Each structure stands twice: as structure tokens, then as C-alpha cells.
């Protein structure tokens, strides 16, 4: 999908006074292909174009020693108006990988145009991908569009998470839901083209109140996790998820089935990023244990 054709971005087609949208240094590209090599998977192909960067695959997950762990890095340190970012991840048969970001994704304040990131994920048979970027923080008047297109084999597993802040919550007395647009779309199909599901999240705080009971209510942070996996795994995981609010917890969470036996979707609301990330980790642990029979790594000392 061309971001220029997205209806909610129609008011934001003016060009920045600085570097033009999509120009040199504004079009970031990452292409990664992971392949199975028996005892471990490897990052077999890597293409990168600034401001997106990957240096190399690391093997720091002691519970899953053969899993390459990759950090996506922004050389500009943030997402700026006019940025057009493209991420392409291909999982060969039997391969596995964990892909994250080096820090939170900060979408800077904008006075012209918008920023977009288009992600294409292809998972072949028996592959396993954890795509778990850091928190997204849209600053005041940010306009950010993210689209993720997934092609997934029925035997493969994708765990894809996003945690979205309301803004710089403690910046100059608070910046809650003062961005212009946050638009995120996930679309999934089978390799033969069969549609599985489409979900679109559109937040325009100035146009539609976010504090409604059916939206954010009194919560500030939103977590969304998509799990595409064989039905037997989805059934086993759903049986272990506790919906609602547990005693003593600040978060509300729950899971439901995706159509066409595609997997599950898990959502979390909370007052701060830390408890929301903790609930996402709980779900991640269920997925890793059920699908691979292995634990997730410990929380880093700096986490």
C-alpha cells in the first residue's frame, strides 16, 4: 500500500522545509533473510540503507542458543517527518529469529507531511519469528503510519508485538494523546493467497476521544500482540491466558482467536509501559514454551 493513498494521511501531504519526504537519508530499507543451518539459524542475507541499520546477528539467548537475535537501529535516532521506512524479513524453511529494536521508537514532533513504515514478513514452513520492537512513542503532532503484510505457512509461527505510549507522558508536565495520527494495519495471508485477517488501529485524538470506555478509558499505554501459529498451539496457549484484571495488577488484558484458525490476538491496557511490557512478556513466555518447549530470556539488567 502506498502511504500517500491512506485516507487519514490526506491532510498531511505538504513537504517539509528541510529534506524532502522520501529523499536521500529519508528512505530507509532493511532486507533480511534467515536460513536454517542445522545447529543454528543464520542471517544469510542483509541489505541496509540509512537511516535503517543492522550490524550483525548475535546469539545471546542462552535458552535458544541457535536463534539469531537482531537489533534494528536508526542512525537518526528517531523517526522524522518525511521518513519512508521499509523492512523486509524472510524466514526460510525451518529457520528461527528474534528481531527487535535498539531502543524505543520515538516519532518526533511534525509540522509537515508524515512518516511511514511498511513491513513485509514471509514465513516458510516450520519457521519461527519473534518480531518484538521496543515501545513506540509518538510526540506532539506526530503523524505515523505503519503497515505490516504477512505471508505465513500453516506450519510457521509469528509472534509480533507493539506497545504504544500516549506520548512523552512526563515531558514538560505531560504530553498525553497530543499526536495527530497513529495508524497501524496488519494483514495476513497464506502462501497460496488465502486471506487470514486484517486489523487496523486508527487513533486521531483530536477527532475522536480516546478516553471512551470502549477505547483507552483511563489507561494510557496500549499493547497489541499478534500470534500466527498452528491451531494446536493456539488452543493450548489460549487455555492458559487469564482475561481481565488480576488482583493487585494495574493492567487489563485478554486474548481472542483470529479468524480462519490463523492464531490469537492479545491486547493489554495499562497506566505505564513497564506493567504492559510485563504482560506482553507473560504471553511471550507462553508462546515460546508451547511452540518451542523453551523459556524466554531473563529480563536484562537494564530492562
Image (spheres, rainbow, N blue to C red):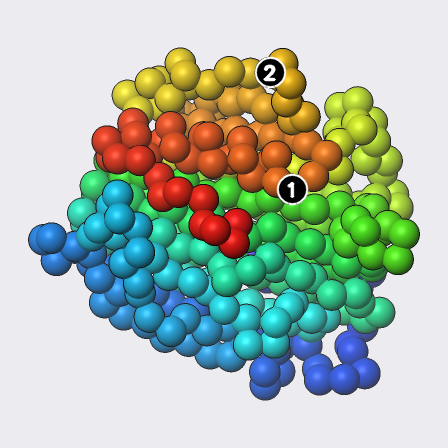
Give the structural element (helix, strand or loop) at label 1: helix
- As rendered, which of 72 and 263 lies closer to the eye? 72
Name the residue tied to disc 1: 273
Q: Up-down: is 265 above or below 174?
A: above
| Residue 196 location, quadrant | top left
Q: Looking at the image, which residue is at 86% across and 35% down?
A: 209
> Where is residue 110 shown, x and y percent of the image?
80, 67
Q: Considering only vertical position in the picture, is 256 above or below 31? A: above
Is the C-beta separation of discs 1 and 2 under 8 Å?
Answer: no
Up/down of 94 relative to 69, above or below: above
Identify the disc placed on residue 59. Answer: none
**Percent of width and height locating residue 237:** 37, 22
Residue at x 50% of width, y 29% of height? 265
Q: How many dots with numbers?
A: 2
| SS category of the residue bearing label 2 | loop
If the image is split into quadrants, where does the N terminus sit?
Answer: bottom right
Give the residue pinned by disc 2.
Answer: 246
x and y, in percent, of residue 287 in the image: 36, 31
Q: Which residue lies furthest to the front in this view?
A: 301
Q: Earlier in the sequence, mark 1 or mark 2?
A: 2
Query: In x, y percent, where is residue 75?
Result: 55, 76
Dot 1: within a 10 Å radius of its alpha carbon, few (fewer than 14), some, or many (20 or more) residues? some
Q: Nearer the viewer, residue 77 or 113?
A: 77
Res. 78 image quadrant: bottom right
Q: Judge the density around disc 2: few (<14), some (14-19), many (≥20) Cα neighbours within 10 Å.
A: few
Q: How far apart are marks 1 and 2 (CA)?
A: 17 Å
Q: Is residue 275 left or right of residue 262?
A: right
- Left or right relative to 116: residue 287: left
Amino acid at each position: 500500500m502506498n502511504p500517500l493513498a491512506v485516507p487519514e494521511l490526506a491532510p498531511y501531504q505538504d513537504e517539509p522545509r528541510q529534506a524532502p519526504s522520501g529523499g536521500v537519508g529519508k528512505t530507509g530499507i532493511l532486507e533480511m533473510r534467515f536460513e536454517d543451518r542445522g545447529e543454528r539459524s543464520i542471517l544469510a542475507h542483509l541489505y541496509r540503507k540509512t537511516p535503517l541499520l543492522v550490524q550483525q546477528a548475535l546469539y545471546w539467548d542462552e535458552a535458544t542458543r541457535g536463534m539469531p537475535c537482531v537489533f534494528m537501529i536508526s542512525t537518526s535516532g528517531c523517526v522524522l517527518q518525511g521518513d519512508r521506512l521499509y523492512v523486509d524479513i524472510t524466514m526460510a524453511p525451518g529457520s528461527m529469529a528474534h528481531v527487535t529494536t535498539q531502543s524505543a521508537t520515538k516519532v518526533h514532533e511534525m509540522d509537515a507531511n508524515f512518516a511511514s513504515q511498511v513491513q513485509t514478513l514471509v514465513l516458510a514452513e516450520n519457521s519461527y519469528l519473534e518480531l518484538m520492537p521496543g515501545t513506540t512513542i509518538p510526540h506532539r503532532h506526530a503523524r505515523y503510519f505503519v503497515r505490516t503484510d504477512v505471508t505465513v505457512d500453516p506450519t510457521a509461527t509469528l509472534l509480533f508485538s507493539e506497545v504504544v505510549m500516549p506520548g512523552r507522558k512526563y515531558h514538560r508536565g505531560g504530553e498525553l494523546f497530543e499526536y495527530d495520527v497513529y495508524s497501524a494495519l496488519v494483514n495476513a495471508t497464506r502462501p497460496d493467497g488465502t486471506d487470514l485477517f486484517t486489523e487496523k488501529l486508527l487513533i486521531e485524538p483530536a477527532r475522536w476521544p480516546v478516553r471512551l470506555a470502549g477505547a483507552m478509558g483511563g489507561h494510557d499505554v496500549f499493547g497489541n500482540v499478534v500470534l500466527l501459529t498452528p491451531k494446536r498451539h493456539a488452543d493450548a496457549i489460549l487455555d492458559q491466558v487469564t482475561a481481565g484484571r488480576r488482583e493487585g495488577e494495574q493492567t487489563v488484558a485478554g486474548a481472542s482467536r483470529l479468524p480462519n484458525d490463523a492464531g490469537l490476538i492479545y491486547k493489554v491496557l495499562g497506566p505505564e509501559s513497564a506493567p504492559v511490557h510485563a504482560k506482553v512478556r507473560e504471553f511471550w513466555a507462553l508462546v515460546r514454551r508451547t511452540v518451542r518447549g523453551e523459556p524466554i530470556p531473563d529480563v536484562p539488567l537494564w530492562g
